[in-house]
Image (cartoon, grey):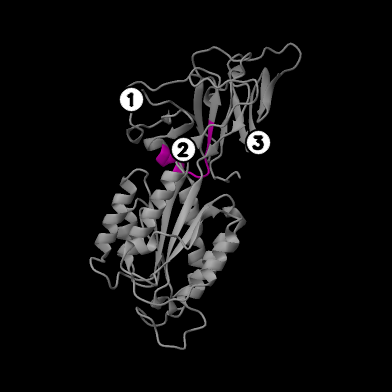
Amino acid sequence: MRFRYVTPVLLGFCSVLACGSKDESTVDAAAGSANIKTGNGGGQISGPSGGLKTGSGGGAATGGPGDTFDPDAACATSAADGQPEPVDLYFMVDITGSMHCPVPDVAQCDVEPKMPFSMTTRWTVESAALRAFMDDPANAGLGVGIRFFPSNNNVCSAASYVQPTQEIALLPDAARALDAAIAQQEPGGNTPTVPSLDGAIQHARAWAKAHPTHRVAVVYSTDGYPMGCNANTIDAAAALAKASVAAQPSIPIYVLGVGPNLTDLNKIAVAGGTEKAFLIDTKADAAAELAAALASIRTTAVLGCTYTIPAPPAGQLLDPGKVNVTYTDAAGKVSKVLQDPANTACSMGSGWQYSADGSQINLCGALCDSIKANPGGKLQVLFGCATEVAPPK
């Protein structure tokens, strides 16, 4: 199933019989030699004296009588949609006793209140938001799994949280099982932050190793600070998050805080590579804030910088030495992106590189940051013209 992304990538393949042989990319809107129009189905390159229409099945040159076809534009003879790497989110969700606290929270509520519980609690609001997320058509193609804490047994052992309540699987097919798992939960107990986060990271890393073409992240949701268990502190949880994002495979940690006075959760999010926690004000419209936070997590997780190269159409060959990249920002300005020089670490680069096995294109350094910060932009990868490489720094 194809996953829907904010920044589509169009990959063109060079026909064996129709490639141009010029040494430089000629798709440059600023120069006026060709204009680029992109869409989900392919791209169109056109000039004043002719045009080339391309799609996933190939392309054909067109032009009026007496027109001279631009040999530069002829480099790109076909196009196909590229596939950004699949994304999986593994949720570790708090069902401690304080999730019975009322919403809106008219008084400070840090521990499980006495019965009878309010008709609207942190758990009723969050569980509804989680089920809505699983059922949202916008999440089709997203991999999602879930686990809850505290555990019924060995509450303080990370091993108790490694196995999921519901394994990671693709939405929408997995939505029914995820909804059922959420509906079965009943809050109670203290907050084993460090053991539950440790278990979530262990499972996410094992899943990522078993699915090396996927990008995996943990979504850690809690309504309070650590309580109970030895060495169960915010700083210890932040250390786990830092190690998680630094390891290979890297597992970033998104943090969702449901309740008042949870600013220290930002330490875990920052250490886990996601800048800050999503903090929900339970004295305000918690339902709307939860929905917005989950949508933001989805968007930021999905905006990646690695794209899988599709197989070329029948009868065509992929020439890795004839690849060029352009980026169109939200205002429509087209910029040429150069390949990083050989032996440049991607984290230190500012262009693009092939993955080690040549099956993917990685956007590096400042370029990756720009793509994530500008979801309205479009990346286009064109095949056919000799690759332009940035000069060594």
Q: Dot 3: within a 10 Å radius of its alpha carbon, few (fewer than 14), some, or many (20 or more) residues?
A: few
Question: Which-is-in-front pick, marks 3 and 2?
Answer: 2
Question: Is residue 371 found inside the magenta-colored segment of the image?
Answer: yes
Question: Is residue 8 found inside the magenta-colored segment of the image?
Answer: no
Question: Which-is-in-front pick, marks 3 and 1?
Answer: 1
Tell me: residue 110, above or below residue 243.
Answer: below
The residue sitting at 63% across, 14% down in the picture is: 18
Write down the region rendered in magenta. 368-380
Q: Which residue is mark 1?
A: 343
Tag 1, which secondary structure? loop
The quarter of the picture where residue 209 lies is: top left
In the picture, the disc for residue 306 is 2
In the picture, the disc for residue 41 is 3
Residue 121 percent location from the top left of the image: 47, 78
The quarter of the rendered structure image containing the N terminus is top right
Residue 252 percent location from the top left of the image: 38, 51
Tell me: residue 143, above or below residue 327.
Answer: below
Residue 310 percent location from the top left of the image: 57, 32
First of labels 3, 2 by sequence position: 3
**Marks 3/1: CA–CA distance:** 34 Å
Left or right: 74, with 357 as reference point: right
For the question of whether residue 287 can be seen, the reply is: no
Q: Dot 2: within a 10 Å radius of its alpha carbon, few (fewer than 14), some, or many (20 or more) residues?
A: many
**Marks 1/2: CA–CA distance:** 18 Å
Viewer-proximal residue among 285 and 111 = 111
Residue 181 percent location from the top left of the image: 53, 67
Tag 3, which secondary structure? loop
Report the amino acid beneath label 2.
Thr
First of labels 1, 2 by sequence position: 2
Report the amino acid beneath label 1.
Asn
Viewer-proximal residue among 360 and 205 = 205
Viewer-proximal residue among 113 and 192 = 192
